[in-house]
Amino acid sequence: MIDPITALAGIQSAISLVKKAAAVANDLGSLAPVIGKMFDAKSVATKAMLEAKRSKKGSNMGTALQIEMALDQAKVFEEELKMLFMQTGKIDVWNKIKARQAEMDRDDAKEISALKAEEKKAKEKADEMTEIVLVIAIIFFLMFFAFVGVNELIDFCQKTRGCV
């Protein structure tokens, strides 16, 4: 499991790093490594947020909301980056970056859907086992009452001598 606190710190750190690098960069090409790190951190944070929400623990839920807000800040900052690329006439580079990000997001979505499918199978299996145990318990319960009833009937017949 991805630690939500670490993921939150990672996305915040990556955004800060890109902002600092953008302020001193001579050209957009020198921003490529830090922009890549930001998108990686964003992907990790998204996975951590989903896992934290899925865990349904109070502390993780709060962290998931913080991650969601950090991801929203990242989205706003991405728009600023997009404008920077537009102003320098490098929108085609930005479009390639966003295409690569979309590809990463698709891969993440496949991973998340596979995880959800596994969880669904596990839940179905647990439900099935619960049903089996319940059916067995009901059968034993009915057999117990049948045994007690037959025993009582035999006792009654023996005491009254009239069940022939």
Image (cartoon, rainbow, N blue to C red):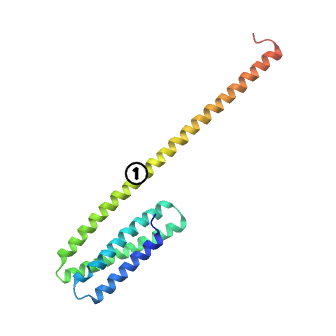
Q: Relative to the observer, which residue lies in front, 33 or 79?
A: 33
Lateral position of residue 27 relative to residue 6, left or right: left
Is residue 88 found left or right of 16 in the rendered image?
Answer: left
Q: Name the quadrant of the C terminus.
A: top right
Q: Where's residue 18, x and y in %?
A: 32, 82
Other residues around mark 1 within 10 Å, as few (<14) / some (14–19) / many (≥20): few
- Residue placed under numbered mark 1 in the picture: 117
Q: Residue shown at 44%/66% (left/top)?
A: 2
**Which residue corresponds to the image point at 53% horizontal and 41% vertical from the top-left?**
129
Tell which residue pokes out farthest to the right in this image. 159
- Look at 18% across and 83% down and name the residue there: 88
Query: x%, y% of residue 58?
Result: 54, 66
Q: Position of residue 23 (x, y in %)?
A: 29, 88
Q: Looking at the image, which residue is at 36% across and 78% down?
A: 14
What amino acid does circle 1 point to?
Ala
Query: Splitting the image into 4 quarters, where does residue 28 fall?
Result: bottom left
Residue 101 placement: quadrant: bottom left
Q: Between residue 1 and residue 42, name the one nearer to us.
A: 1
Viewer-nearest residue: 21 or 76? 21
Side (left or right) of 94 relative to 9: left
The image shows residue 130, relative to residue 86, as above or below, that is above
Query: Residue 61: x percent and y percent?
Result: 50, 66
Give SS at disc 1: helix
